[in-house]
Image (cartoon, rainbow, N blue to C red):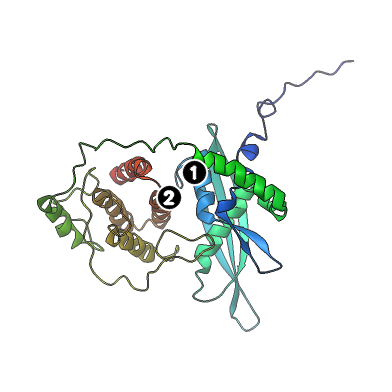
């Protein structure tokens, strides 16, 4: 008796290697050699985030970590020696949503930004499971010829005109702030850390940058592998994360950020802090770091996301 043939699954009809082949090769300019533990190639964390954003979408909306659970391992004397993180990595690709659990252990040292670094480690590990920078993990970067081939390949890509490189017309809806226009935003800044001034709509496109005053504590530039564009902060402390957003707003001029962008970003930060939404603040920081690494045209698009979140 002949057995019935089962129809091929929808997944079987697809190219299972599509994502892997799209992200497996690494631009050598986003790596560096580390002469520790026998020597290895380190991948730029920000470069990885940028690559994932190109494929999946905006961090915190289309991909990222959720349900983070930290735990500590202690030695016999009760001294913390290892930090552990369990989380769920989620992403969207070709209109399909995917997720899987991820866990990472890391040696713990007080004052070493261990929580921030372990989040970066977990993200890198999750992305590697999808094929990101696979050539590095496969050891191909130990072959000088392969590295040279990648340099030539990515140099050719980098020489192509960027689609956003053409001069952008001045946005009529966002004129350069005059001294009179800046005054309401300055008044709004007096309430940073408490509540937004009712006279200023921080979620209105074109709002000025709040002038933030006060001591931000020991906030400095992050020192995780690959470097962070955000000030140092504790991802488990909503106040610490809020101060990091404030520090970026204070430093907007030095970072060459449009003053009218800071209002919506600070407005969302204030609202998120007032709601005590620590996951929302983590997402805000992730999107803010993405924003800081973008070109002017890309920042305009990400600003719209901040504005929409603030209206919810």
The quadrant the N terminus occupies is top right
Can the viewer see residue 65 in this picture?
no
In the picture of the structure, the residue carrying the numbered disc 1 is 53
C-alpha distance separating marks 2 and 1:
8 Å
Image position of 12 (left or right of 197): right
- In primary-sequence order, the first of circles 2 and 1 is 1
Q: Position of residue 190 (x, y in %)?
A: 18, 63
Closest to the observer, 305 or 165: 165
Total marks in image: 2
Which secondary structure, mark 1? helix
Image position of 5 (left or right of 233): right
The quadrant the C terminus occupies is top left
Q: Position of residue 123 (x, y in %)?
A: 56, 53
Can the viewer see residue 166 in this picture?
yes
| Residue 93 in which image quadrant | top right
Which residue is found at the position 41% from the left and 60% from the top? 230
Q: Are marks 2 and 1 in contact (CB under 8 Å)?
A: yes
Closest to the observer, 261 or 269: 261
| Residue 244 in which image quadrant | bottom left
**Quick one: label 1, few (<14), some, or many (20+) residues within 10 Å?**
some
In the picture of the structure, the residue carrying the numbered disc 2 is 290
Which residue is found at the position 56% from the left and 49% from the top? 89
**Quick one: label 2, few (<14), some, or many (20+) residues within 10 Å?**
many
Which residue is found at the position 33% from the left and 64% from the top? 243
Q: Position of residue 208 (x, y in %)?
A: 20, 51
Closest to the observer, 90 or 76: 90
Residue 89 position (above or below residue 189): above
Which secondary structure, mark 2? helix
| Residue 222 in which image quadrant | bottom left
Image position of 262 (left or right of 11): left
């Amino acid at each position: 008796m002949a057995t019935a043939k089962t129809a091929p699954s929808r997944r079987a009809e697809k190219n299972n290697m599509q994502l892997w082949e799209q992200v497996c090769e690494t631009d050598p300019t986003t790596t560096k050699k580390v002469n520790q533990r026998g020597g290895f190639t380190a991948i730029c964390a920000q470069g990885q985030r940028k690559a994932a954003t190109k494929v999946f979408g905006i961090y915190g909306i289309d991909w990222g970590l959720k349900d983070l659970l930290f735990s500590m391992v202690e030695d016999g004397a009760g001294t913390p020696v290892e930090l552990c993180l369990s989380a769920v990595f989620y992403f969207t690709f070709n209109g399909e949503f995917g997720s899987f659990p991820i866990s990472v252990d890391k040696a713990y040292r007080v004052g070493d930004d261990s929580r921030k670094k372990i989040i970066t480690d977990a993200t890198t590990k999750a992305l590697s499971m999808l094929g990101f920078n696979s050539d590095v993990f496969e050891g191909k970067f130990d072959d000088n010829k392969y590295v040279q081939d990648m340099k030539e390949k990515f140099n050719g890509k980098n020489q192509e005109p960027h689609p956003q490189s053409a001069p952008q017309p001045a946005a009529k809806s966002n004129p350069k702030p005059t001294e009179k226009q800046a005054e309401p935003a300055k008044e709004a800044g007096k309430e940073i850390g408490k509540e937004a001034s009712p006279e200023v709509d921080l979620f209105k496109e074109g709002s000025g940058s709040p002038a933030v005053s006060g001591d931000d504590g020991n906030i400095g530039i992050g020192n995780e592998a690959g470097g962070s564009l955000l000030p140092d902060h504790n991802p488990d402390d909503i106040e610490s994360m809020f101060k990091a957003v404030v520090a970026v707003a204070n430093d907007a001029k030095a970072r060459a950020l449009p003053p009218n962008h800071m209002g919506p970003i600070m407005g969302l930060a204030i609202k998120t802090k007032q709601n005590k939404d620590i996951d929302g603040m983590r997402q805000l920081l992730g999107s803010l770091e993405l924003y800081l690494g973008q070109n002017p045209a890309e920042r305009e698009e990400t600003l719209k996301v901040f504005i929409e979140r603030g209206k919810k």
